[in-house]
Image (cartoon, rainbow, N blue to C red):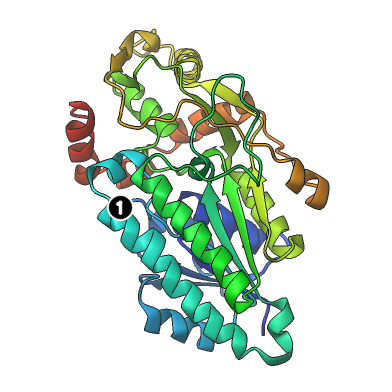
Amino acid sequence: MENVVLVTGGAGFIGSALVRLLRRVEPLGVVNLDKLTYAGHRANIDALAGDSGHVFVHGDIGDLELVRRLFQEHRPRAVMHLAAETHVDRSILGARPFLETNVLGTHALLAAAREYHADCGPDRDRFRFLLVSTDEVYGSLGPSDPAFTETTPYDPRSPYAASKAAADHLTAAWFHTYGLPVLITNCSNNYGPRQYPEKLIPLMILLAMEGLPLPVYGDGLNVRDWLYVDDHARALRLVLDKGRPGQTYNIGGAAEIANIDLIRTLCRRLDDLMPESPHRPHERLIRFVPDRPGHDRRYAMNFKKVKSELGWEPRESFVSGLFQTIDWYLEHPEWIQAVAGPEFRQWLKRQYGTAA
């Protein structure tokens, strides 16, 4: 068993940040399996072009024979499973892709990993299967409720959250039933460079730059805990190397903020960076729209376990991470043009009535 990791979804937002970290810090060989759906892009891993320690495979995690072949060819010491359908709004409109990828795709990976683990011989004890999941499996918090812990009961409120909860339960079952050495992480909302612009922060940046309405669900007081993507990637590497099989680790950013306050902060930053913009002040672009079904009111993550056991905590404050993120999008219009194509524009019009 070589020092190689199979990463699924490694051309996506979080996955590509992880792959870059794995190749940069005490480098591990990476086999990067990605289906390249609308949210996965080769541009996210351009920095690894020509890197012999990074092997990209265009394929589906649900293709059991392909996954089996990758295990046999590359003999990885771990799987880091990030491939997923992730956008709540899309899951409300149509849940089937979320079930196919998040549930059945995870099952295929677990099945192949179990076969491979049984055949690892003396290396069996080194193997790990890490599932990267979400805080949304825990449901919603009230204003004064304590943050989610690893023992918070599951209470998913959207098709997306339900599909990720199912993946968590399958993964845990493979540990208890078959002895597969699994790890599960549940993270808060990620943000940072290269995030597909259907998500809140890059969506607001893109729309504000173009002078289009900034849609805010409900009263805008829904609270999220924000985690900078590179901090998340560091945590995942630590959990892989030092986490205890069978355990779950919550990863949070210690950065709770209401959506409306986030958007106003973002608008003021754009005002400062774009003094010649005809859309200043960008805050005047904010438009409140009807709330989405099942919209969780608040998320917050207690990450004391990963801090005490593994020594991890976020390095970026929310403001420092947000400013870095805004700067990156302003400096990379070619990336926006490449990923925010006709499919994205059509989705935006259907979802918000905005033709970007």
Q: Is residue 36 visible?
A: no
**Is residue 64 placed above or below 324 in the rendered structure?**
below
Q: Which residue is mark 1?
A: 38
Q: Is residue 88 left or right of residue 175?
A: left
In this view, the residue in front, 189 or 231, is: 189
Q: Is residue 222 visible?
A: yes
Quarter of image, res 213: top left
Query: Whole-percent x and y of residue 52?
Result: 56, 75
| Circle 1: residue type | Tyr
Q: Identify which residue is drawn at 41% across, 56% down.
A: 84
Q: Is residue 273 left or right of residue 345?
A: right
Q: Residues within 10 Å of mark 1 (few under 14, many from 20)?
A: few
Q: Secondary structure at mark 1?
A: loop
**Is residue 64 placed above or below 209 in the rendered structure?**
below
How many numbered marks are there? 1
**Is residue 90 placed above or below 278 in the rendered structure?**
below
Query: Whole-percent x and y of residue 17?
Result: 55, 52
Location of the N terminus by quadrant is bottom right
Q: Identify which residue is drawn at 47% across, 73% down.
A: 109
Q: Identify which residue is drawn at 47% across, 49% down.
A: 13
Quarter of image, res 229: top right
Location of the C terminus by quadrant is top left
**Is residue 242 placed above or below 194 in the rendered structure?**
below
Query: Whole-percent x and y of residue 128?
Result: 65, 71
Query: Whole-percent x and y of residue 210?
Result: 29, 23
